[in-house]
Image (spheres, helix red, strand yellow):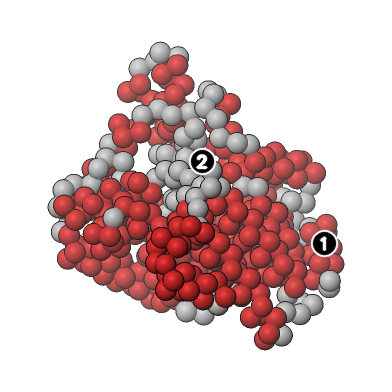
Amino acid sequence: MVFIGYVFFLFQWGGKVALKIVLVEGPGSNIRLTMLMVGIAWLLIGSILFLLSLNVINRRNIFSIVTFYLFSFMYLNILRERLNYGDVGDYIKAAKNLSSGVPFHNRYLYPPLWATLLQPLVPFGDYVIFLICFLANYFSLLLFYFLLMKILVRYDYSTNFSALIVFSILCVNVPLLRTLGYVQVNLHVANLILLSLLYYRNNIFLSALALSLAVHLKISPIILILPMIVNKDWRYIAYFATITLGLVIFTSLMNGMQYYSNFLTNISNIYSANGINFRDNSIDSFIRATFTIAKLNLNNSNTVISIIKLFICVLSIGICYRCVKNKTFYSGIQKEEVLYNSCIVLMFLMTILSPIIWEHHPVFIIFPFLIILKRLFIMESIIIYIIAYLFIFLIPTFDFYPFSYHRLLGMILCYIIFIIYLKDSVNKVVWFDKINHRLSTI
């Protein structure tokens, strides 16, 4: 209130000229972005004071609240220091494509929904669209932290253990930093997936709505409908199909059905839009780069890629079956067991099958990666897990064949851990249960 009163006084006294006297843009700064970050900081401080006034902070939740606010302020300051942002420009350009009635540019590889939602902002200019996407990403980050803790509790993690490992994995996390640095849509998709899983127990309509929205932002989460088919959950599938069709009708009424065919065209030409890039950690990129460097016929690479992906699909289905049968990650109602056990593998599968895996895409596997932790019952799997963690989340981005494909290698290592699960049906992990119990009593 003091700050608002001060600004109001300055405007009354001398208008914008007076404000410019006391407010300057320092070196390495963007004044609008800086003030936005400071404003959010005051909101965070205000929310802490509000919680204290309500006396809702107690011994049971203080650990999770403290880690949440430390995390919030840490990323607020990281984002304050960044001036240039990447992929949001592609979203802005796609929204302008819709407004102009021209096809999507070839780098827009998403269904039309996201561009349609941004389209009404086009008259306000590029920077306004950027700021709204930027704000949406930051608050989506805070929601992601909260939802991760909630979903881990669903998998029998204590609240304090959930807070500890979520804070630990997100504090230094290259995919998360790249997602924020490029104002990518991935956090919104990840949150919708987590909401879909959390709502499945009590409200299948909201669960289906969240999954449908995720699919309309990025097509790959469609794979998560498979457990519903296995469950013969026809009501869920009906909700999902109806909502998905409704969103197609909405976006088509706004701009025409042709943008879906335009999206499919862009997807089919995905290689030409991006070329071969060593930081793209997809199977497609690795095989195509290998063929190019070895001076082999690049046309034959598609056959190799298809064979590898088919093998991974078959392997994933086998792992899903065994995890559901053994109740590897979750035990409860049968339909929930099918979904909550299989989705851990399916989220790896939806990522590794993608024709492009930029350094921000492993945001989708943060949740299943944390769930794997509860079933590391032998030293070999613990060592593999630690190496996978380093490769996927800690090593900075660089371009150096073949070493820059470390994230792909990290995901393969996670599949090796899954194979270890296939060989052993052990359900009780003593070290995990001890730590989980001790943290729950703090």
Position of residue 227 relative to residue 365, above or below, is below
User: Residue flagged by tag 1: what amino acid is it?
Assistant: Ile
Dot 2: element: loop
The mark that comes first in sequence, 2 or 1, is: 2
Label drawn at residue 335: none
> Which of 69 and 235 lies nearest the eye of the viewer?
69
Residue drawn 57% across the image and 37% down it = 407
Q: Which residue, given by chain and number where applicable, does mark 1 sit on?
A: 435
Labelled disc at residue 359: 2
Q: How many marks?
A: 2
In which quarter of the view is residue 373 placed? bottom right
Q: Quadrant of the N terminus?
A: bottom right
Residue drawn at x 51%, y 41% as measured from the top left: 359
- Residue at 66 percent across and 43 percent down: it is 389
Image location of residue 202, percent across then percent down: 51, 80
Q: Is there any visible trace of residue 48 in the rendered image? A: yes
Residue type beneath disc 2: Glu
Q: Secondary structure at mark 1?
A: helix
